[in-house]
Amino acid sequence: MTTRRKTVYLANAYGFSAQQRATVLPQLVAALESLGIEVWEPFERNNQTANLEEGWAYRVGQADVRDVREADAIFAVVNGVPPDEGVMVELGIAIALGKPTFLFRDDFRRATDSEHYPLNLMLFAGLPEYGWERYYYTSVEEIPSPDKELARWAAQP
């Protein structure tokens, strides 16, 4: 009997930059895959850089929404001030669907009015009130940490 690997939609804007797509994104994907997770990276899955034919934007958007819906969880890169608009929409969809939510921000700038959260409080709506820090990652090295929730979630049957 084979068990299906859990899937994580990697909401990110790294694919828009050739340099980040070649250097940063592979490290992030590798760290997630080290937990035995199947990573759904939208730029790779939905050919988001091939925008040559009419209607491409609609098709890409629909494919991304479908992937967020079908993935088991979301790992959202929330860098930037403010974070990427597309990532925010994908995160909102995942939160509305009740998906397990994990946030990644290695951007040191604060983007909040809250004393409690480093970003807009709505980005934390999919996390628990207490212990949200276990769902929030500030480095690639932190991703496989057994002290964080992604590793615990990935290990559950």
Image (cartoon, helix red, strand yellow):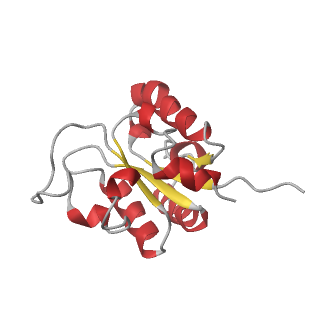
Judge whether residue 80 can be spotted in this image.
Answer: yes
In percent of width and height, residue 45 lies at 60, 48
In the rendered picture of this protein, how many numbered marks are placed on residues?
Answer: 0
Frontmost residue, 106 versus 87: 106
Frontmost residue, 121 versus 154: 154
Frontmost residue, 130 versus 24: 130
Identify the residue shown where x is 15% and y is 50%: 111
Q: Quadrant of residue 71?
A: bottom right
Picture quarter with the N terminus: bottom right
Identify the residue shown where x is 46% and y is 67%: 94
Q: Is residue 62 left or right of residue 91?
A: right
In percent of width and height, residue 153 lies at 56, 56
Judge whether residue 8 can be spotted in this image.
Answer: no
Position of residue 11 relative to residue 138, above or below, is: below
Q: Residue furthest right?
A: 1
Picture quarter with the C terminus: bottom right
Position of residue 126 relative to residue 36, above or below, is: below
Q: Is residue 84 left or right of residue 63?
A: left
In percent of width and height, residue 78 lies at 32, 49
Q: Is residue 83 left or right of residue 152?
A: left
Identify the residue shown where x is 53% and y is 54%: 9
In percent of width and height, residue 82 lies at 20, 51
Position of residue 2 relative to residue 65, above or below, is: above
